[in-house]
C-alpha cells in the first residue's frame, strides 16, 4: 500500500489569475510583503499495490492522462509506503 | 526573502466530492488500484522579509484569515529562505 502525493502547478510561463487575486486580497488586508503568488493543486491518492516501480509508472500515467494538463501544468509526486 | 509553501487540505471528517470524482474517473480509466483520493490546494508565496520569525507569524495569520477556511480545512506551511 502506497500513498501518492501529487503536486500540480502552472508552468512558469503561464499567467495565474487565481494567484493574482490572492495576491491582491493579501495586500488589501495589509500583507504588503507578499510578492508573487502561484496556486496549484495538491492530491493524496491511496494506491493498493506492493510493487513500487509499477506504482510509480502508473501514477505517472495518471498524471499525464487525468491529473495534470501537461500543456499548461507541471506535476511531480512522491510515493510513500505505509 | 522567503518562499512560503502552503498546503491546505480538507479536514479528515469532511467529505471530498472533488476527490471522489477524481477517484471515479481514475477507475473508469482502468486504475483500479486507486483507493481514497483527497484534493487540496498548494500555494507558493514570495515573502519580502528578512525576519524569519516575523514572516512565520505573518504567514500563519494569512492562512487563518484568507488562505484556509479553518472550519473545514487544515493548513501547514514551510518557509524557505532564498
Image (cartoon, coloured by chain):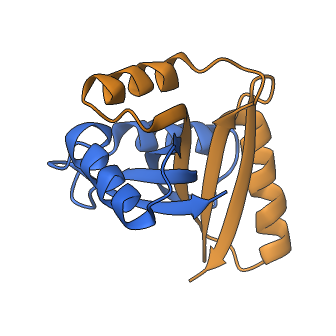
Chain colours: A orange, B blue
Image coordinates of residue A33 in percent, x first then y, are 43, 38
- Residue at the far bottom: name it: A82
Q: Quadrant of the C terminus of chain A?
A: bottom right
Question: Could you tell whether A62 is left or right of B61 in the image?
Answer: right
User: Measuring 34% from the left and 30% from the top, which residue is drawn there?
Assistant: A26
Question: Could you tell whether A74 is left or right of B47 in the image?
Answer: right
User: Measuring 29% from the left and 44% from the top, which residue is drawn there?
Assistant: B62
Q: Nearer the viewer, residue A24 or B7?
A: A24
In this rendering, the answer to whether B38 lies above or below B41 is below
In this rendering, the answer to whether A65 lies above or below A62 is above
Image coordinates of residue B22 in percent, x first then y, are 52, 39
- Residue at the far front: name it: B50
Q: Quadrant of the N terminus of chain A?
A: bottom right
- Residue at the far left: name it: B71
Q: Nearer the viewer, residue B36 or A19?
A: A19
Report whether residue B15 is seen.
no
Q: Nearer the viewer, residue B63 or B46?
A: B46
Image coordinates of residue A13 in percent, x first then y, are 78, 22
Image coordinates of residue A27 in percent, x first then y, are 34, 26
Report whether residue B1 is seen.
yes
User: Measuring 83% from the left and 67% from the top, which residue is drawn there?
Assistant: A54
In this rendering, the answer to whether B40 lies above or below A45 is above
Question: Could you tell whether B76 is left or right of B72 in the image?
Answer: right
Q: How many marks?
A: 0
User: Measuring 35% from the left and 51% from the top, which residue is drawn there?
Assistant: B59
Amino acid at each position: 500500500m502506497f500513498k501518492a502525493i501529487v503536486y500540480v502547478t502552472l508552468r512558469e510561463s503561464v499567467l495565474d489569475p487565481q494567484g493574482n487575486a490572492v495576491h491582491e486580497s493579501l495586500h488589501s488586508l495589509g500583507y504588503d510583503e507578499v510578492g508573487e503568488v502561484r496556486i496549484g493543486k495538491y492530491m493524496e491518492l491511496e494506491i493498493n499495490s506492493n510493487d513500487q516501480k509499477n506504482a510509480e509508472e502508473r501514477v505517472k500515467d495518471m498524471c499525464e492522462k487525468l491529473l495534470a494538463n501537461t500543456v499548461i501544468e507541471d506535476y511531480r509526486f512522491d510515493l510513500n509506503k505505509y
